[in-house]
Amino acid sequence: MEMQILKDAHATVVTITGRLDAVTAPEYEKRLNDLIAGEETGFVVDFEGLDYISSAGLRVLLATAKKLKVKGGQVRFANVRGTVKEVFDISGFGSIFQMDDSVAAALAKIA
Amino acid sequence: MAMKSDRMQCISTVENLPVVTGFLEECADRFGLEARKKFRLLVAVEEAFVNICSYAYPDSEGDVEIYCSADGDAFVLGIADKGSPFDVLSLPEPDTTLDTMDREIGGLGVHFIRKLSDSVSYRREDGRNILRMVFLRD
């Protein structure tokens, strides 16, 4: 998994590519927790380049979203499609997270 | 398309997941499993492998054996460990309809194993837990 972090005017855009699995999920959690500890409150995660996700990946997505919610922040997910979307749907998590069709659409809702 | 039975063995540590994934991707490609089915297979196997690392060998590392074979249109794989008897399929189903952040994530792995495979069964045999999963060619 590769992570790229870009600060937009109103939110931090986190681009994840490759695999979010039991091996890579801890890295995502650590990077997000560091940003949350740094008082970042608005996040957009771009799933465009993510090929694979398992329950370990969903677990850290949920854990960081909960942490943000407690701090009054929010996270939106953009470009969740195809087989990754199927995993969200089977888990029932598709309806828990805020999903958008593009990063621009997600940013517009946070601004 | 004939495929001889293939097997691999590794130690139960999550760091070995890429090895397991690589092995099964090769087997699935040789069998001719389509991309979407292969993805389902890889997620189900990750869940099973991680479960073994956490529950079959909770305080140590042990051997995990994975084998796959072709049976007509069925890609059959087994994942075996010598850990304490544990039927992952005996775990309760999570409530996936709860539309709330309060949802706990426990039990999601076995939910994926059930939903992503075309069939799955557990047996205890010769001191081993064996989880057998079947993925049908679409």
Image (cartoon, helix red, strand yellow):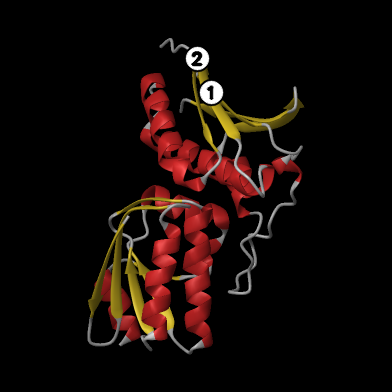
Q: Residue at x 46, y 39 (%)?
A: B42
Residue B116 appears at what percent x and percent y? 55, 41
User: Which sits in the foreground, A95 or B1?
Assistant: B1
Q: Which mark is residue B67?
A: 1
On screen, residue B9 above or below A78: above
Helix, strand or loop at label 1? It is strand
**Which numbered circle lies on residue A92?**
none
Q: Quadrant of residue A8?
A: bottom left
Q: Chain of mark 2?
A: B
Dot 2 corresponds to which residue?
A: B5
> Could you tell me which secondary element the residue under label 2 belongs to?
loop
> What residue is drawn where x is 29% and y is 79%?
A12
In the rendered image of this protein, does residue A78 appear above or below residue B10? Answer: below
Is the same chain shared between marks 2 and 1? yes
Amino acid residing under circle 1 = Tyr
Q: Residue at x 71, y 52 (%)?
A: B93
Contact (Cβ within 8 Å) of mark 2 with mark 1: yes
Q: What percent of the width, then of the height, locates residue B88?
A: 70, 42
